[in-house]
Amino acid sequence: MNMKFIRLKFAVMAFAALAAWTLPVQAANIRIVTTLTDLADFAREVGKDHVEVHSLATGIEDTHGVPMKPSFVPMLNRADLLICIGFDCEHAFLPALLEASKNPGIQYGRPGYIDCSRDIIPRDVPRSTDHSAGDVHPYGNPHYTLDPVLAKTAVREICEALVAFDPKDEADFMHNRDVYLAKLDAKIAEWQETMKPLKGLQFVSYHEHWPYFADRFGLVYFGTIELRPGIDPTPRHIEELIRTMKADHVPLVVREPQFPEKVPRLIAEKTGASLVTLPIMPGGVSGTDTYIAMMDYIIKSIKTAVAVK
C-alpha cells in the first residue's frame, strides 16, 4: 500500500467526526450511496420517494479515482445500501472509505453491498495484470453502462436490491423500474436509428471508456491516446497514432472531460479529425444531469462532429 493512499485514508478518518454533524437529516426510508452518478440516477428512478440518494462522484471525475472527501465517511455510516459499478472500477477509493466507515451492512459481501456488474459478461479481461501493462482492470473493462442495453442490467440489480431491503414496497419499485426501462428502450431505438448511418465509423479516445458503446452502435475503436491504461502518451506514441490515423482516415477524436485537451486537439489538428468532448457519467458536461440526457448528448455530439467533416 503506497503512502499517498495511506495518507488519504487517515485524512478521511480524522475528519469524519467533524463532517458528521454537518450532514442534513433526511426523511427518506432507504439511504443509498452510489459510487458513480449514473447509478445514482438509476436508484432515484427506481426508488422515487422511497429513497435518499447520494453519489460519491459528481460526474466530472475519473471513475477510477474519485477524490476522497471527509464527508463521505458519515454518508457511508448512515447508508442502508452501497451501489457500485463493479469489476474493481472503484478500487482506488472505495476500499479505504468502507474501512473508515465501519458500517457492517455495506461491506463487501454483505447484503447492503450491491455490485451492478454481477450479470455482465466483461470485455477485455487481461491475460496478465503486470504493472508494465498500465493500470489494467483485472476483471475486465468496467465501463459497461455506456452501452444503454447493458445499463438496463444495472437498473434491474438496483430494483432487486431495493425489493430485498424493503419488500413491502416491491410493487412500487417494480412499477418504477418498468416505466423507466420502457422509456430507456424507446430511447435506445431512437439512438440506434440515429447512429445507423455511422456504422463502421473509426475513432480514438483518450482512455478505453468506449468498447461497449462502440459494440452497441457498430463503431470501430481504433485506439487510445494513452500509451497504456493510466499511462500518459509519449511523443513517439502520439506520432505513431497520428501516422496510422492519417493512413486509415480516422475521422473522430474523443476526449473525456477528465483529461487535458491539449494532446487530443493536437492529434485532431494533425489528422484532420473532428474533436469532441464526451462525458462518461451524468454531470460530466453541462446539461447531462441524467443518464438519458447524457446518452442524448453523446449521440448528438458524435453525429454533429462527423457531419462537419
Image (tube, rainbow, N blue to C red):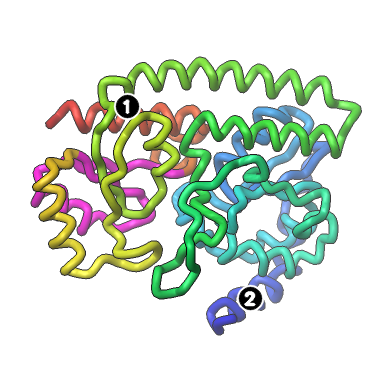
Front one among 223 and 112: 223
Where does the image place residue 148, in percent across and percent down from the top left? Answer: 50, 31
Is residue 102 visible in the rendered image? The answer is yes
What residue type is disc 1 on? Lys
Of the numbered discs in the image, which one, if any, rests on residue 228? none
State the quadrant of the C terminus.
top left
User: Does 19 appear above or below 54?
Assistant: below
Where does the image place residue 213, in percent across and percent down from the top left? Answer: 41, 37
Name the residue located 60 percent from the left edge and 35 percent from the top edge: 41
Q: Quadrant of residue 154?
A: top right
Looking at the image, is mark 1 or mark 2 nearer the viewer? 1
Q: Which residues are magenta?
A: 252-280
Q: Secondary structure at mark 2?
A: helix
Where does the image place residue 115, in percent across and percent down from the top left? Answer: 68, 48
Answer with left or right where residue 15 lies relative to residue 270.
right
User: Does residue 239 belong to the magenta stretch?
Assistant: no
User: Does 106 appear above or below 184?
Assistant: below
Name the residue located 79 percent from the left edge and 35 percent from the top edge: 162
Check disc 2 and report the residue beneath it.
Answer: 11
Q: Secondary structure at mark 1?
A: helix
Check disc 1 and report the residue beneath it.
Answer: 300
Name the residue located 66 percent from the left edge and 69 percent from the top edge: 96
What residue type is disc 2 on? Ala
Where does the image place residue 203, in percent across and percent down from the top left? Answer: 25, 42
